[in-house]
């Protein structure tokens, strides 16, 4: 049997190259710096491709990759890979999501200690021939409260190291249970509580539409006087203009930033003018150890896949046998949409996700459907890409137990999927099925019977069952030029409460959501993006 051929088209540390060269059954070609035309000309003869950020795996490259089975990214981000194109060709895309975790966590803590003791400013002053000892009086960090926003791989390492520095650690994470957080020595709190209590705040959450400018004027206003802020996660989570205002007003004591909304940071950016701000040029993953680690990990992963079929840290799902994939795909899509929906409802302290499949959905296999639901749920909160392969591991790390149940149909729909998330704060349940045209439909939500399309933008409204409420909502949406394509209502006769799902053609602005909440007899309004 011929050896598997692997092309390395970006610079990779010798440690990673040695892993590949030392693996029996793998032939390696190291050709960094290839342009698209050159890559397209040779990629057809290779079984594996290892890249970093320079190589762009475009649809044209994928089309030329006739024998390619796996793409390995040494690092986290896969923005330079066309994932749908690779998936359609059955090419597995892998990354190394934890390879940079220790390095980035250490950098965040280094920024915090440097900020608290004003180290960069003192160094600059001393090099200028000054001896300003009194000017650079700092702050101890021991026995203070550190607030961590995001308890993923990096956030958990920060929490562990911070406790060694005698910091009291509190944290916010939308998909971690209180019990799991407690086992890590972290007190789980709300975001507002974190702002109110933390002496120091460090950010370790992905940049999403929900976290864009999460730290804005309102957030700064809620923080303790003199709080210190660290961001080594993603630029854009902190509103930089708001940060400048908060520091100039004396509300925030200082900030240390490794990431920015636009990189590189412009020489005339207002942050440079503030003595209380430390800026570093996106150094979170920049250590020799991290570069070696991700290179070794991706070399091992690609070799294990090509030689043994072992899958680790896959971004997409390897192709299933055609017949099974064709039958399962619509149900997995329903489950993913249910998971995404549940992730956007009122937060519960999630300990368990229970996925129950009836009819054909159960016969085809509960596990891939359950993993689809889990991936959909976690995808709303994860910095790293999550898919049905990686989702169970991410759930375990967050203390979420997954229960799979297969049942016979009892009444109603011949085949359905019911997803329940539960914890000490309560639970949410969503039930879905396939429509007549194979589209995902929601047929039950938290005890209400409905029949709604699970697609696009939805405004979910709970209100007292009173005349005029639907008209008032429709009028307000119309006033703001928001077209309603569908609307479904479910009733709870016992509580005299209605649940309405308004499918709208455009995303509804937060100001409009606030107006809806002020309508008489409306109890709750939740914008949902599917």
Image: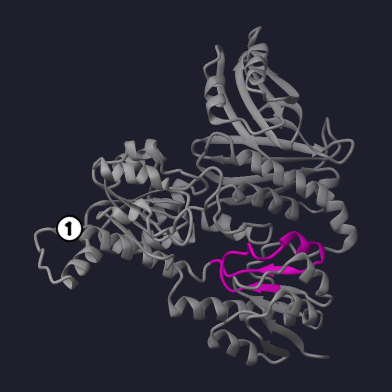
Quadrant that contains the C terminus: top right
At 63% across and 22% down in the image, what residue appears?
480
**Residue 286, image x and y in percent?**
44, 73
Name the secondary structure under disc 1.
Answer: loop
Mark 1 crowdedness (10 Å alpha carbons): few <14, some 14-19, many ≥20: some
Task: Please state if 20 lies on the left or on the right of 116 as rendered.
Answer: right
Task: Tell me which segment is drawn in magenta.
Answer: 71-97
**Residue 133, image x and y in percent?**
10, 64
How does the figure colour the protein chain or chains? one colour
Say whether residue 54 is magenta.
no
Number of numbered labels in the structure image = 1
The image quarter containing residue 139 is: bottom left
**Residue 516, image x and y in percent?**
57, 20
Residue lying furthest top:
467
| Near-viewer residue (240 or 90) | 240
Quadrant that contains the N terminus: bottom right
Say whether residue 86 is magenta.
yes
Task: Please state if 342 lies on the left or on the right of 134 as rendered.
Answer: right
Q: What residue is disc 1 on? A: 138
């Amino acid at each position: 049997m011929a050896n598997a051929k692997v092309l390395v088209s970006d610079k990779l540390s010798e440690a990673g190259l040695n892993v590949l060269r030392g693996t029996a059954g793998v032939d390696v070609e190291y050709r960094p710096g290839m342009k698209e035309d050159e890559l397209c000309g040779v990629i057809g003869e290779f079984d594996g491709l290892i890249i970093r950020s320079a190589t762009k795996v475009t649809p044209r490259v994928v089309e030329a990759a006739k024998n390619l089975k796996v793409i390995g990214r040494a690092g986290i981000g896969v923005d330079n890979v066309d994932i749908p194109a690779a998936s359609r060709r059955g090419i597995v895309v892998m990354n190394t999501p934890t390879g940079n975790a220790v390095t980035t966590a250490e950098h965040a803590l280094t920024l915090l200690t440097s900020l608290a003791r004003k180290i960069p400013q003192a160094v600059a002053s001393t090099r200028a021939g000054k001896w300003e000892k009194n000017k650079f009086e700092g702050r101890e960090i021991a026995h203070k409260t550190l607030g961590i926003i995001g308890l993923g791989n990096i956030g958990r390492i920060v929490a562990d190291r911070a406790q060694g520095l005698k910091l009291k650690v509190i944290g916010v994470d939308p998909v971690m249970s209180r019990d799991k957080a407690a086992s890590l020595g972290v007190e789980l709190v709300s975001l507002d509580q974190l702002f109110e209590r933390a002496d120091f705040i460090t950010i370790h959450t992905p940049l999403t539409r929900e976290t864009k400018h999460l730290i804005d004027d309102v957030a700064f206003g809620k923080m303790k006087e003199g709080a210190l802020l660290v961001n080594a996660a993603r630029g854009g989570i902190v509103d930089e203009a708001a940060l400048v205002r908060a520091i100039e007003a004396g509300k925030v004591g200082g900030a240390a930033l490794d990431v920015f909304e636009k990189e590189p940071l412009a020489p005339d950016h207002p942050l440079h003018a503030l003595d209380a701000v430390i800026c570093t040029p996106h150094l979170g993953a920049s250590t020799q150890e991290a570069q070696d680690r991700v290179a070794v990990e991706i070399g091992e992963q690609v070799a294990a896949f090509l030689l043994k079929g072992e899958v680790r840290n896959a971004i997409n799902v390897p192709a299933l046998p055609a017949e099974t994939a064709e039958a399962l795909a619509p149900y997995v899509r329903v489950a993913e949409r249910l998971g995404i929906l549940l992730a956007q409802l009122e937060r519960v302290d999630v300990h368990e996700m229970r996925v129950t499949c009836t009819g054909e959905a159960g016969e085809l296999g509960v596990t891939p459907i359950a993993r689809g639901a889990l991936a959909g749920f976690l995808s709303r909160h994860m910095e790293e890409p999550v898919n049905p392969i990686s989702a169970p591991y991410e759930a375990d790390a967050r203390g979420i137990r997954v229960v799979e149940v297969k049942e016979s149909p009892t009444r109603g729909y011949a085949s359905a999927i019911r997803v329940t998330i539960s914890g000490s704060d309560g639970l949410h349940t969503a039930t879905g099925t396939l429509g007549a045209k194979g589209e995902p439909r929601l047929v039950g939500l938290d005890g209400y019977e409905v029949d709604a399309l699970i697609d696009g933008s939805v405004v979910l409204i709970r209100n007292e069952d009173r005349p005029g409420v639907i008209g008032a909502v429709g009028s307000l949406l119309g006033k703001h030029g928001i077209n309603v394509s569908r609307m479904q209502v479910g009733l709870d006769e016992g509580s005299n409460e209605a649940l309405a799902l308004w499918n709208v053609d455009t995303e509804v602005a937060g100001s409009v959501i606030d107006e809806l909440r002020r309508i008489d007899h409306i109890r709750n309004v939740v914008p949902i993006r599917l």
